[in-house]
Image: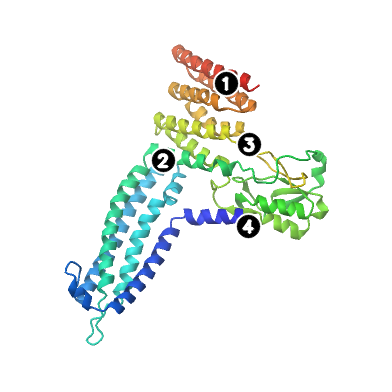
Amino acid sequence: MRARFIVIYTLITDSFWFLPALMALLSAAAAVGMVRADAVLGEDWVRDISWIWSGSAEGARSVLSVIAGSIMTVVSIVYSLTITSLAQTSSHFGPRVLRNFTSDRGNQFVLGTFIATFVYCLIVLRTVNAEPGSRFVPFLSVNLGFVFALASLGVLIYFIHHISQSIQAENLISGVGVAFQDAVPQLFPKSMGKATGDTALPKPAAWDSAHAVESETNGYVLGIDTERMMQLAGEHDLLLKLEKRPGDFVTCASALLHVLPAQRASEAVSGELVKCYSWGNHRSPHQDVLYSIQQLVEIAAHALSPGINEPFTALTCIDWLGASLRSVAAADMPSPHRHDEDGRLRVISPTTSFDEIVRASFDQIRIYGCANVMVVRHLLSTLAELAPHLRRADDCDSLKAYVELISADADRQLGNADDRARIEQARLQAAGRLTAMRARIG
């Protein structure tokens, strides 16, 4: 099941432990291989190379012990300080930013390098033997331990630079925005059957007798295996009406979808349909359209709160929200009606409209920032800049209505006549550009 595999793969690779664990296993294999190479090469070759380490067994133990101990000391100190800085960052920008730290490949690689060096030194250390008659000093392996130690020092310098950059507001916000734009093709897929075909829909009353497929657990919907769902609907000649979409929270025994005709929805078929859903304790950006959008909104809302009061951070969020909406405006919105190869309607799926994304992007910012002239003007100018990129008349209408909503809220909050005049000027400009684009689209 491709969709479930993608969700599981994303959860594993985004976890903080996967890459370090993989690197630790590779370092263990490297240690075993290097020790075997030392056993084959012997000790004579060391005398011909003056610039590598060639000490005694006690020296080898000391070197490996110092490297291993130093690495674990560095790990404990550095990551203790990192967790402290992340705690402050999460209180400043919201708790969801911690996911960006744990899923960052650079952070995972740094921890993996430290753990791999530690594991390598431990495994090589246990092979050093100073007993007469069975003396064994793995010179090649110890010298490679030196290389790992130097690499760890370089990685430590990189980590300090990387973490200081990643917790800066601009970089944090841009990372979320870029991730959303990269995910637009999979957030608005075209692969769930055909979008055209027989559009005859059952009467609303027909769904009252439909069979409800219920959830077996509590949690967030992470993904839906649409290919398998279309296959099941075709095999059993079913019409499925999905009630939940990725990002929704469901409780045990709540309806995931309804099936017509009800008599064909056997227990086995219902069980297969439930398996098309993937669950989790927290939301994932894999198929959840609003996840990254709401992450940007959360950062902006924190920035506009009285305790933090950083409107320039909110302006940066608005910029990236505008860029995200531009990507959505250019995308083909998927139809809720999906058909099989024969043109028969098989799945009715809830979709996310452009208007819903606009409101999810700006509602909270509008509420928290309507008394800030700079924030309101930036919102209006961002909506105006979206006008040339719109392709659908409904999208123009949504933005034009939202321009009026922002202006009305600001007019109620602002008592200064000059401020209201500046907002009115920005409103007229935005409304004019959107009206012109609406007329051009037709």
Q: Position of residue 197 (x, y in %)?
A: 76, 40
**Quadrant occupied by the C terminus:** top right
Q: Position of residue 17 (x, y in %)?
A: 43, 59
Q: Are marks 1 and 4 in contact (CB under 8 Å)?
A: no
Q: Which residue is mark 1?
A: 434
What residue do we see at 46% from left, 15% from top? Answer: 422
Task: For marks 3 and 2, give the CA distance.
Answer: 28 Å
Amino acid type at mark 3: Met
**Quadrant occupied by the N terminus:** bottom right
In this view, which residue lies farthest toward the left?
A: 50
Task: For marks 3 and 1, give the CA distance.
Answer: 20 Å
Q: Which residue is mark 3?
A: 333
- Between disc 4 and disc 2, the foreground one is 4
Task: For marks 4 and 2, give the CA distance.
Answer: 33 Å
Q: Are marks 4 and 2 in contact (CB under 8 Å)?
A: no
Q: Earlier in the sequence, mark 4 or mark 2?
A: 4
Q: Position of residue 25 (x, y in %)?
A: 41, 67
Q: Which residue is mark 2?
A: 172
Which sits in the foreground, 149 or 72?
A: 149
Q: Are marks 4 and 3 in contact (CB under 8 Å)?
A: no
Q: Earlier in the sequence, mark 3 or mark 1?
A: 3
Amino acid type at mark 1: Leu
Secondary structure type for disc 1 = helix
Secondary structure type for disc 3 = loop
Which sits in the foreground, 195 or 420?
A: 195
Q: Which mark is residue 1?
A: 4
What residue do we see at 56% from left, 16% from top? Answer: 432
201 over 380 or under it: above or below? below
Would residue 55 be visible to someone looking at this image? no
Q: Position of residue 57 (x, y in %)?
A: 22, 77
372 over 238 or under it: above or below? above
Amino acid type at mark 4: Met
